[in-house]
Image: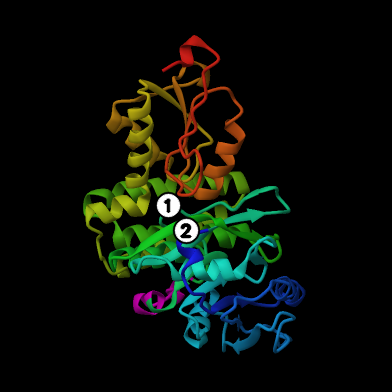
Amino acid sequence: MHSATRTTPSLPLSFVLPTRDRHARLLSTLDALGAFPPPSAGGEVVIADNDSAQPIRAPRTLANGLSVVVLVRPRNEGAAARNAGVRAASSPWIVMLDDDSHPDPGTDLDSLARSLAAREADTAAVMADIHLPALARRESGGLPEVFIGCGVAIRRDAFLRAGGYDHRFHYYAEEYDLAARLLLAGARVEFDPAFRVQHHKTDEGRDMNVILARLVRNTAWVTQRYAPEHERRADLRRIRTRYRAIACKERAEAGYAEGLRDLRRSIAFQRRTPMPVPIWDRFIGLTHAREALQAAFAARPFRTASIAEPGRNEWVVRRALDELGVRTIDPHADAEAIVIGTLSPGPMLDAAETLETSGRRVVSPWLVPGLAAPVVLHRATTTSAAA
């Protein structure tokens, strides 16, 4: 946790989560939250009920003394129901959860509260290291300065000044839109591997056609709104290509087609607020990839690299390598370094853990604070892999 936690006074925490028609799952999450020793300054849980068919039944107080407030929304607002939760919350920091996520059982909430209180004034959000216990891996999604809504602490006043979540997104990519507005306001988003959240993700209510329709539309909205003009068209093409491939894999071509139709109807109505290039580079992770790869190159130069575990914004990793003059090749055995090809924190950390026993030189595409070896170096087992 943040080093200043030892001397920084604690503060109350507000846990905000939306729910809809998942009563048993919600009660399980409340039981998990109630099992923690509370922050010494106290706290609360604010539930935003997205117009459930049956009224939410929740205790007024959890076993550990945290108070519980239920806000009944007049309609299903999706992620934007969190906005009402934040307005009703009283703490300066909001811990955003889903109705199936909660801090890791080993978490000291008082240490978390002190860690948040110690953050620099321009830190608007702190991302958690989100684990999926049922799948034995971390949560996908996000970028070095783009959080995931089921596990992030957000400064309340920064959230409200930014306008909260845009209700038009409903779900999917709404965090990218909010993170973009936070960065444009001069704020930073950080990742803290000591802040861990468990997400008990299920397929309940998940329709891949609906998901693909929203992903292709919403992600393109973000690009249309914030990409510098010289980047906008290329990024829109990448989005269509990425989600077309996912739709084919998931047999959700109909949803993808509907998303494209919706995008064509709506893209002209997205207000353009192009980011200055330095902020855009942070938003897409290019700044972080440059920093990490340049550090690895300075420590021990390499002329060739192979991309392993490609994922979110792989193209950014390749661009940073190209700027260094490093040629990307396959197979791995012929490359001087293996570079992890995703900028999403969860998959990147999973890949680092998987590859660190490979006997090869493995380089992470961004430097995660608090990790002992953000750039993983291993003595090569073959001459061709030596630097």
Counting from the top left corner in percent of width and height, residue 136 is at 70, 47
Q: Taking 122 as reference, is 239 above or below it?
A: above
Using the rendered image of the protein, determine whether residue 61 is visible from the camera's viewpoint: yes
Counting from the top left corner in percent of width and height, residue 198 is at 66, 60
Q: Quadrant of residue 220?
A: bottom left
Q: Is residue 122 magenta?
A: no
Residue 144, label in figure: 1
Q: Amino acid at mark 1?
A: Pro
Using the rendered image of the protein, determine whether residue 260 is visible from the camera's viewpoint: no
Numbered disc 1: secondary structure: loop
Counting from the top left corner in percent of width and height, residue 31 is at 75, 74
In terms of depth relative to the viewer, which is nearer, 175 or 272? 175
What residue is drawn where x is 71% and y is 54%? 133
In terms of depth relative to the viewer, which is nearer, 37 or 177? 37
The overriding secondary structure of the stretch rendered in magenta is helix
In this image, 105 relative to 270: left or right? right
Numbered disc 2: secondary structure: helix
What residue is drawn where x is 62% and y is 84%? 51
In this image, 331 relative to 200: left or right? left
Counting from the top left corner in percent of width and height, residue 240 is at 43, 49
Q: Dot 1, crowdedness within 10 Å: few (<14), some or many (≥20)? A: many
Residue 264, label in figure: none
Question: What distance separates the C-alpha of mark 1 from that of mark 2?
Answer: 21 Å
Label 2, on which residue? 3
What residue is drawn where x is 67% and y is 83%? 52
Q: Taking 241 as reference, is 379 above or below it?
A: above
Bounds of the magenta span?
Answer: 158-169
Q: Amino acid at mark 2?
A: Ser
